[in-house]
Image: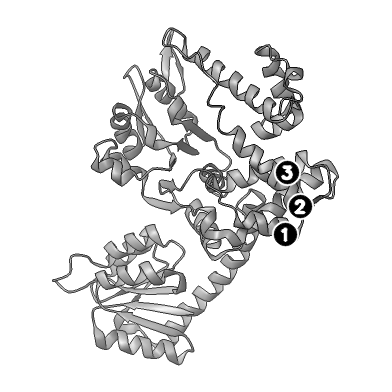
Amino acid sequence: MKILIIDDSVDFSSTIADIIKSLGFDAKTLHSPDDAISYLKQEHINIDLILLDMEFGFAEKMNGLDLLNIFIRIYPEIPVVMITGKGSIETAVQATKLGAINFVEKNIITKSRIKGIVDTVLKNNKNIVEENANVIKHLEQCGIIGTSKIINEIKKTIINYADTNLNILITGHIGTGKQLVASCLHQFSKRSNNNFVTIDVPNLTNNYKKELFGFVNKNIFTNGLFQEADKGTLFFDKIDELPMDIQLQLITPIGDRQVKKIDGTDIDNLNIKFISATTKDLSFMIRNGTFSEQLYHRLRECQIRLPSLDSRREDIPHIVNYYTAQYNQEQSRNKYFSTSAMEYLMKLQWNGNVRELHSTVKLCLQTITKDTLDVPDITKLIQGHKAQNTFDKTSTLSLSVDKTLKENLAEVDKLKIEETLKITSGNVSKAAALLDVSRETLHIKIRKYNINAKEFRNTK
């Protein structure tokens, strides 16, 4: 156990450190808020308890409460005990309301008192570890898979942030699991019995005010997505694609959690936790004037940065085995990837991260008939999979401004299906696996677009 002591008195903090060391624990002393912030950025994983002074010298811009607010927001897993001098008991009580687990007066600090604090933290930590072990098991069942150091930190962060009321921004490359993490944050929170409402930002229409805040029709009020998410969670997926005019409209509702009904007659006070996800650098967008700084700070009260699969390659076997076990259970099969196949998958570049890996594993399991999946078959499939992701350059689309968006999208949909059937020589099951849709869904689309799958046989 390592305890961080933050106090501007060198003599006092040294005395406390000596007591802590005599109890058999490690101690680190720091004497200014800036030093503490810098130190924790690098070492927060190794700190089990913070003893934090309430007041610092006049030259310091921050006091103990300012630091407490930062620590509770960024490192909610680290318990904080406030150290207070004479006359600041009321402030210390306020600190416990903000999240400090306790406070202790300087003039009554003794070895036995410190031991009591440490024992309490150890007991709480033991309970938390046991609880967290169960939650981590559930996280893995929900798809947060791996044992690498970086993914274990993500699991701990999900657990720690889930029960806070802080708004969370999730960032990461495409396919890293942002939607999955958002769902887990809701499932493992006290809000889990209430709605988890997803807003797919690119699909917001010109009637977004009605969609988000509700509307009145014939004196009957219909809830918007904000009202639907009351006491639950509202998830903005692809928040970077939010037009600036809508961004400005959301600053007050998200900041104050108040929504004026569309007719302006009433205001709803809502209890909503906001989670947002993006693949973009929003701070860069702020500098370019394409994202509101005010909205950014309201959405990003804390942040989860999801790692690329390239930075945790040791997790690839865990992910592959997880989805293989799922498939075997569902299909009553006993398929597995050979050792050489697993090594091959670990060496590949996964630009689409876990989503691409999952899609490839799914494709292999559904289309390779042998129980042992080995390198030659996988290589052939993956090459075909990559080929189908690039349309034949000789193909032309009849996209036109004279057509509706729905008609143009249908053209793209049809061409994608035809190109995939060409790759699979008209095999609908293999095409469905490549397109990541069910066989039934693909048959419906084939009939809809009057595609004759037989025409694609023996065309490879």
Q: Is residue 1 above or below residue 249?
A: below
Residue 286's spot in the image, x, y percent?
27, 41
Q: Can residue 146 be seen here?
A: no
Instruction: Name the mark on residue 364.
Output: 3
What kind of residue is marked 3?
Cys
Q: Nearer the viewer, residue 5 or 398?
A: 398
Tag 3 secondary structure:
helix
Residue 15 in the image: above or below residue 194 = below
Distance of label 3 from label 1 (alpha carbons):
15 Å
Determine if residue 200 is in view: yes
Where, quadrant-wise, is the C terminus in this rendering? top right
Q: On residue 154, which mark appears?
A: none
User: Disc 2 on helix, strand or loop?
Assistant: loop
- For residue 87, side relative to residue 254 (left or right): left
Query: Where residue 15 sits: x, y (%)?
Result: 33, 89
* Nearer the observer, 164 or 250: 250
Q: Are marks 1 and 2 in contact (CB under 8 Å)?
A: yes
Apparent side of residue 116 relative to residue 433 in the rendered image (left or right): left
* Residue named by callout 1: 340
Precedes in sequence: disc 1 or disc 2: 1
Residue at left offset 41%, top offset 46%: 169
Disc 3 + disc 1, Cβ < 8 Å = no
**Number of the label disc, if any, that sits on residue 374:** 2
* Image quadrant in which you'd find residue 260: top left
> What's under tag 1, amino acid-wise?
Ser
**Residue at 72% from the left image edge and 59% from the top image edge:** 340
As measured in the structure, the alpha-carbon distance from the residue carrying label 2 to the one carrying label 3 is: 10 Å
Q: Is residue 127 above or below residue 217?
A: below
Residue found 27% across the figure and 73% down from its top: 35
